[in-house]
């Protein structure tokens, strides 16, 4: 079993889509700085795509926002670009867990969903 954890800042607000089976799905994209710099002294940043499905996708869309820090854990899914066979395959994380590390925005506190509510659902 392969398990990967990635921590970074969400690069955009989340848009829910519906899969062919009718379940909610969303692609989260995070930016994560590396611990070291290149030879010129520039900080290197990786951009990682994360796929969430079902209730997890709905909760992420409700609670996450552009710029918030989050951690996602799951396994890999390889992406093959059939329209451009010369392009190298990529990957994304199929998340089984997502935790939002940033505090909620003040305007969201009135309708906040407690973590106990997510576990009970």
Image: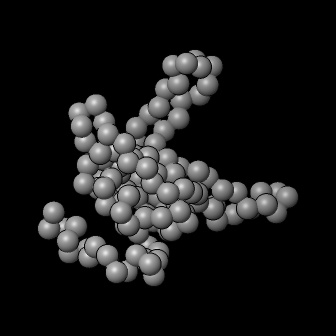
Please name the residue shown 53% across and 35% down the image: 90
Q: Residue furthest left?
A: 120
Q: Is residue 112 visible?
A: yes
Residue 120 sits in quarter:
bottom left
Coordinates of residue 87 in the picture (x, y in percent): 61, 25
Query: 114 left or right of 76?
Result: left
In which quadrant is the N terminus drawn?
A: top left
Query: 42 left or right of 100?
Result: right
Colouring scheme applied when the structure was drawn = one colour
Residue 64 sits in quarter:
bottom left
In which quadrant is the C terminus drawn?
A: bottom left
Coordinates of residue 39 in the picture (x, y in percent): 82, 57
Q: Is residue 50 visible?
A: no
Instruction: Check the image and report above or below for 78 versus 12.
Output: above
Coordinates of residue 103 in the picture (x, y in percent): 45, 79
**Towards the viewer: 10 or 85:** 10
Please name the residue shown 79% across and 60% down the image: 42
Please name the residue shown 34% across and 44% down the image: 25
**Towards the viewer: 56 or 75:** 56
């Amino acid at each position: 079993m392969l398990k990967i954890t990635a921590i970074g800042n969400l690069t955009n607000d989340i848009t829910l889509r519906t899969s062919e089976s009718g379940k909610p799905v969303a692609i989260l994209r995070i930016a994560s700085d590396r611990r070291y710099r290149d030879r010129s002294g520039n900080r290197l940043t990786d951009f990682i795509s994360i796929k969430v499905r079902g209730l997890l996708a709905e909760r992420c869309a409700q609670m996450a926002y552009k710029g918030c820090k989050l951690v996602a854990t799951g396994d890999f899914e390889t992406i093959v670009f059939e329209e451009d066979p010369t392009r190298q395959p990529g990957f994304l994380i199929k998340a089984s867990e997502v935790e939002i590390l940033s505090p909620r925005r003040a305007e969201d506190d009135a309708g906040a969903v407690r973590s106990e509510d997510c576990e009970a659902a």
